[in-house]
């Protein structure tokens, strides 16, 4: 994996990208069925389509909220599709958002003529019916970069962190320094993804939660060092390097309090259906999968607070 010095544009949640990628491959390589009708062979043109209008509602001020991948998916199968992009703050967008009860961005509202296309029946699972005649592209294909119904919280940054994911220490290190430099509240949420893990990932999360309770000022340093050490030494050795009492940590881990800490840690990830690490939630309503972070690009999301502060 090559880590570029930027937040990767087009990456929302990992599961969304994987789904979209494989759907894209299936679209590219799936052959159109040959017509068995001799009389209609002269007019049967694989891929022929009507002009279909699709309205994309997104945050046009967000450089990371790209819609290119789902546009490519649709254009590949429906070549006549025309896209119009509008900002979610515009009056037209506000009416459509209310009319269709849209909760996340980006959103694709597509002309119902698409249902008359030859390919639609095979691909109808990619779409859902709106509250009017419009057809919506499902969230699993569009990806999610913004939650419209979540209250914006200025100077708030959440990181969903998996101890075993590549690049986690680099992402954490940059976000720690960024939050200090810009007086941003950084909160960590520990994730255990579905990939096979060495060691005891559940225990690693419990240790981190215990340290957060007992030594909140030392948590970030411990997490950074633990990610580096995790394949080589036990968490006890890492804690001792940081001058933390493993006995106190162990006592809290086996106490009734730990189940409450674990539940609280899972709450936001489950609400947003985050299943991978290196996912950041900006100001409580914008979400992205990251690899490495450009501080100046990230700062742009908090520019308004800095100007007003």
Image (tube, rainbow, N blue to C red):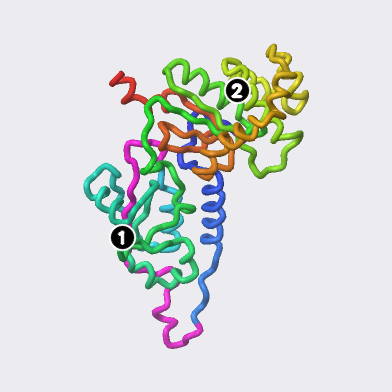
Rounded to the nearest whole Å, what is the CA distance between mark 1 and mark 2? 51 Å
The extreme left residue here reads: 91
Q: Residues within 10 Å of mark 2 (few under 14, many from 20)?
A: some
Q: Please count the marks in the image.
A: 2
Magenta stretch, residue numbers: 36-65
Q: Which mark is residue 53?
A: 1
Q: Position of residue 163 (x, y in %)?
A: 65, 31
Q: Which residue is more in the foreground, 214 or 60?
A: 214
Q: Which mark is residue 212?
A: 2
**Residue 47 appears in which quarter of the rendering?**
bottom left
Q: Main secondary structure of the magenta part?
A: loop
Q: Is residue 15 left or right of residue 66?
A: right
Which element is circle 2 on?
helix
Mark 1, secondary structure of its residue: strand
Instruction: Indicate yes or no whether the magenta region holds residue 60.
Output: yes
Residue drawn at (22%, 47%) of the image: 91
């Amino acid at each position: 994996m090559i880590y570029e010095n930027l937040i990767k544009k087009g990456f929302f949640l990992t599961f969304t990208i994987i789904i979209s990628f494989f759907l894209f491959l299936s679209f590219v390589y799936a052959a159109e069925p040959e017509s068995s009708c001799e009389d209609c062979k002269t007019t049967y043109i694989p891929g022929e389509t009507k002009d279909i209008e699709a309205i994309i509602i997104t945050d046009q001020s967000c450089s990371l909220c790209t819609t290119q991948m789902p546009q490519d998916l649709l254009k590949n199968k429906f070549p006549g599709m025309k896209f119009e992009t509008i900002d979610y703050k515009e009056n037209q967008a506000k009416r459509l958002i209310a009319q269709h009860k849209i909760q996340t961005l980006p959103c694709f509202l597509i002309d119902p003529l698409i249902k008359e296309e030859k390919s639609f029946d095979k691909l109808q699972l990619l779409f859902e019916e709106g509250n009017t005649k419009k057809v919506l592209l499902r969230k699993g294909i569009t990806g999610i970069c913004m939650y419209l119904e979540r209250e914006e919280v200025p100077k708030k940054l959440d990181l969903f962190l998996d101890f075993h994911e590549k690049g986690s220490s680099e992402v954490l290190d940059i976000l720690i320094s960024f939050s200090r430099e810009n007086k941003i509240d950084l909160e960590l949420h520990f994730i255990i993804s579905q990939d096979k893990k060495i060691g005891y990932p559940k225990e690693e999360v419990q240790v981190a939660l215990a340290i957060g309770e007992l030594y909140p000022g030392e948590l970030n340093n411990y997490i950074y060092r633990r990610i580096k050490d995790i394949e080589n030494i036990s968490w006890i050795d890492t804690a001792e390097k940081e001058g933390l009492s493993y006995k106190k940590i162990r006592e809290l881990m086996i106490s009734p309090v730990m189940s409450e800490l674990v539940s609280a840690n899972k709450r936001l990830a489950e609400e947003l259906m985050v299943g991978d690490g290196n996912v950041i939630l900006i100001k409580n309503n914008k979400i992205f999968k990251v690899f490495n972070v450009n501080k100046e690009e990230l700062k742009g999301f908090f520019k308004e607070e800095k100007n007003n502060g």
